[in-house]
Amino acid sequence: MKWRVIDYTENNAHMNMAIDEAVSEYVAKGGPPTIRFYGWKPSAVSIGYFQSLEREVDIKKCDSENVDFVRRRTGGGAVYHDNKGEITYSVIAKEEIFPKDIIASYKVICSWIINALKSLEIESEFKPINDIIAGGKKISGNAQTRRKGVLLQHGTILYSLDLEKMFSLLKVSDEKIRDKMIVSSKERVTCVTNFGNIERDRLYRAMLAEFSKGKEVFFDSLSKEEIDMAIELEKKYKSKEWNCLK
Amino acid sequence: MRIEEKIKGGKLVSIEVSDGRVVRITGDFFAHPEELIGLIENELSKIDPKIGEENIANALEKIVKRENGEMIGISPTDLARIFLKAIE
């Protein structure tokens, strides 16, 4: 089985989610299992499928800071995707390639991240349901869905952290709680740069190597069919109907 | 009324029951197919709360099985318990 690898690209939040869905449709129709790496330009907040946009995101602040916001197809929590502060991946393949058990399948894909961090001398471990922790703190969050026989897992590896900005965009009821949450998050969240002077590109190379390890891979871009579908789907991910679904 | 609960070893879930029994379930949990939660909201909007937590949980479990669905971080029992608190 040959895996397609799509090299790192940066897109706006709506297009990123549209591409993940377009690739999922392509894989459902027989397209190759795909590993994709991407970033968010501009920086963005994504919320889980079941979250309430108005309760989670300060939309006015996002607009004034030129930060996108989008609802994901996957569950999980709200995430601030800083343009330079993380690397996002998606793994899209037929369900049967992975364990049927959801947690076990998270563990398989998360092991690729754990190995990438290990190659950078960062020890980490899988923490069910969907996190990876290093030094007892979260360094990677992941989310998965399955539809039409296709598994989509996407997730982020935190490279650097700007908690003040993160909590200015995510809704917190008052300033006192906001301060407490920043302090509490500093105790709960970490990033690659906390473990040494590691360049972001080195993290990417490590991820590329470990996600490809043991697989027959070929580098390719999106097909015309996927690009056309993504352009259509981008409208959905930009729409109020989708983003205000809950 | 809206009740929010962090499930032990699981995820955050909020159930809001408004006039005319409109039920809205939100949170950072996982469920697939994603439509499963809409079906559960619909069931809770018309279920008789007097049948009790266990029977409500069973009704929700039936929907999960029928839809070949899966919920991660929450369970039908959690949803039944929180729903009854929200409807009080």
Image (cartoon, helix red, strand yellow):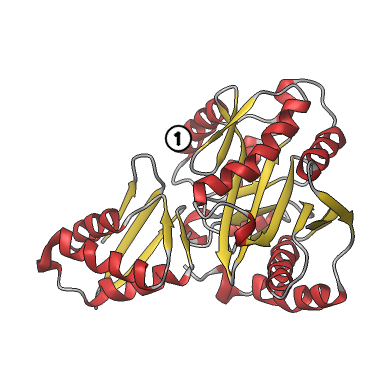
Task: Provide residue A197's location: percent of width, then percent of height.
Answer: 82, 22
Q: Is residue B88 visible?
A: no
Task: Judge by depth and name the residue closer to the eye, B73 or A234.
Answer: B73
Does residue A47 appear left or right of residue A93 in this picture? left
Q: Quadrant of the N terminus of chain A?
A: bottom right
Above or below residue A211? Residue A134 is: above
Q: Report which residue position mark 1 lands on.
A: A176
Does residue A67 appear left or right of residue A200 in this picture? left
Residue in the image at 20% along x and 65% along y: B56
Above or below residue A74? Residue A177 is: above
Residue in the image at 74% along x and 79% along y: A232
Does residue A52 appear left or right of residue A71 in this picture? left
Amino acid tagged 1: Lys
Tell me the chain of label 1.
A
Task: Provide residue A214's location: percent of width, then percent of height.
Answer: 78, 42
Quarter location, residue A58: bottom right
